[in-house]
Image: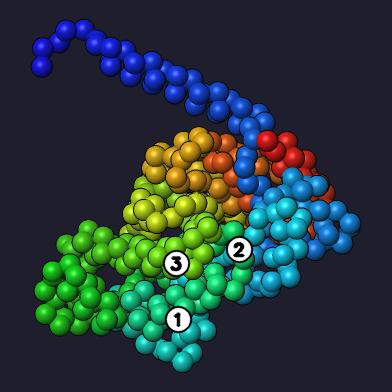
């Protein structure tokens, strides 16, 4: 095409880009000052009884959302929180229902040596292709959505057998059970010719690694597809969220995909809200709360989410306010909240109410920060 200067479309496009960039800069500047309105300001970990017992309401602390473990839900609590003006979101354990293994030892993840992989740091996962386990979790997911008038449900522990929620994660390679190997061979079109598991594992972690990792990510994404289908059928008004590892795809040698089997872009087809878990103190960044902002910024770029009105996908991080591993000083609370609330985030929640409720100075500081983020 001959170059004939910029046409009207070109000028309009440039203008649109400039206006867009200005809007983003304005939003970022406002976020820096923690004055940007943030639609969801939550707490994770159950009904905040300690607030209600003081004769106050969650909204007095700027809180408008509460996450409750799906096992701890009850109808009265859900109704009470809604009367108080808070949204109620369930947290749902997908791959960490360790009690299932008691009666189903064949659901234990298998390591590269062909033997059941010991739970790293005691963290027990489950083989992602065990049909009985998957059916049981789907049935439970359906029950939670059917029985409780929740505003959303968040997947939790939706990753492979690994203990990653600490400064130095333990990330064994799994699952090389006969079922996973046969399914991989069939679906990826690879002839493993009934090789013993240790031999197959050497291939899958060596020359076939890219296909193996892609297939494993696909298995975990397919769980999300089915959760979404159940949500659409049973409670279509509820949001589908996920609490997930906050690493970028480059962090730790690509472990997000290669070890944990999390493909965020693929899951984005089904998920409404991504809630990365940048627990800065727990994960070795106690003195660098800006790490929270960097991880959330990466996620926004990766998913193409900017934190502007009208986007289908939202990012609401869960930030660490309570002490876990390393303490979070009370004076750091406003800073942690401000960094978690910046674009592309449009909401956030605080980990975790139980220990937080025993440190009222932090609750008051969180309340002040949350109130300043209200529209
Ligand atoms: Zn398996």
Q: Mark 1 — residue? A: 136
| Residue found at x 40% / y 65% | 229
Which numbered tag is attached to residue 233? 3
Q: Is residue 50 visible?
A: yes
> Mark 3 or mark 1: which comes first in sequence?
1
Question: Where 375 falls versus 333 (above or below)?
Answer: above
Q: CA distance from mark 1 to mark 2?
A: 21 Å
Q: Is residue 358 visible?
A: no
Q: Mark 2 — residue? A: 150
Residue 61's x, y, as percent? 78, 47
Q: Quadrant of the C terminus?
A: top right
In the displayed structure image, the side of residue 308 where residue 9 appears, left or right: left
Q: Nearer the viewer, residue 235 or 122?
A: 235
| Residue found at x 13% / y 70% | 190
Q: Quadrant of ligand 1?
A: bottom left
Question: Where 46 falls versus 9 (above or below)?
Answer: below
Q: Residues within 10 Å of mark 1 (few under 14, many from 20)?
A: few
């Amino acid at each position: 095409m001959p170059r004939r200067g910029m046409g009207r479309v070109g000028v309009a496009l440039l203008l649109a880009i400039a206006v867009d960039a200005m809007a983003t800069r304005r939003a970022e500047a406002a976020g820096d000052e923690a004055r940007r309105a943030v639609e969801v300001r939550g707490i994770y970990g159950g009904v905040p009884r300690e607030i209600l017992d003081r004769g106050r309401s969650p909204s007095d602390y700027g809180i408008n959302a509460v996450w409750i473990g799906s096992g701890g839900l009850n109808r009265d609590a859900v109704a009470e929180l809604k009367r108080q003006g808070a949204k109620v979101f369930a947290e749902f354990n997908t791959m960490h229902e360790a009690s299932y293994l008691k009666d189903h030892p064949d659901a234990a993840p298998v390591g590269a040596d062909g033997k059941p992989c010991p739970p790293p740091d005691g963290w027990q996962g489950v083989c992602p292709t065990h049909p009985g386990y998957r059916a049981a979790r789907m049935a439970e997911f359906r029950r939670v959505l059917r029985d409780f008038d929740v505003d959303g449900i968040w997947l939790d522990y939706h990753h492979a057998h690994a203990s990653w929620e600490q400064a130095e994660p333990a990330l064994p390679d799994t699952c090389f059970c006969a079922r996973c190997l046969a399914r991989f061979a069939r679906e990826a079109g690879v002839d493993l010719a009934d090789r013993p598991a240790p031999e197959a594992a050497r291939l899958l972690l060596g020359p076939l690694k890219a296909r193996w990792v892609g297939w494993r990510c696909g298995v975990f994404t397919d769980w999300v597809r089915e959760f979404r289908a159940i949500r659409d059928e049973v409670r279509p008004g509820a949001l589908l969220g996920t609490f997930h590892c906050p690493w970028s795809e480059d962090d730790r040698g690509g472990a997000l995909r290669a070890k944990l089997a999390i493909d965020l872009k693929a899951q984005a087809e089904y998920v409404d809200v991504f809630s990365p878990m940048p627990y800065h103190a727990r994960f070795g960044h106690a003195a660098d709360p800006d790490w929270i902002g960097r991880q959330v910024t990466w996620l926004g770029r990766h998913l193409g989410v900017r934190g502007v009105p009208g986007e289908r996908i939202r990012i609401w991080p869960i930030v660490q306010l309570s002490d876990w591993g390393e303490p979070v000083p009370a004076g750091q609370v406003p800073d942690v909240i401000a960094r978690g609330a910046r674009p592309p985030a449009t909401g956030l929640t605080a980990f975790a109410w139980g220990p937080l409720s025993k440190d009222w100075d932090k609750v008051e500081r969180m309340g002040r920060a949350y109130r300043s983020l209200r529209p």
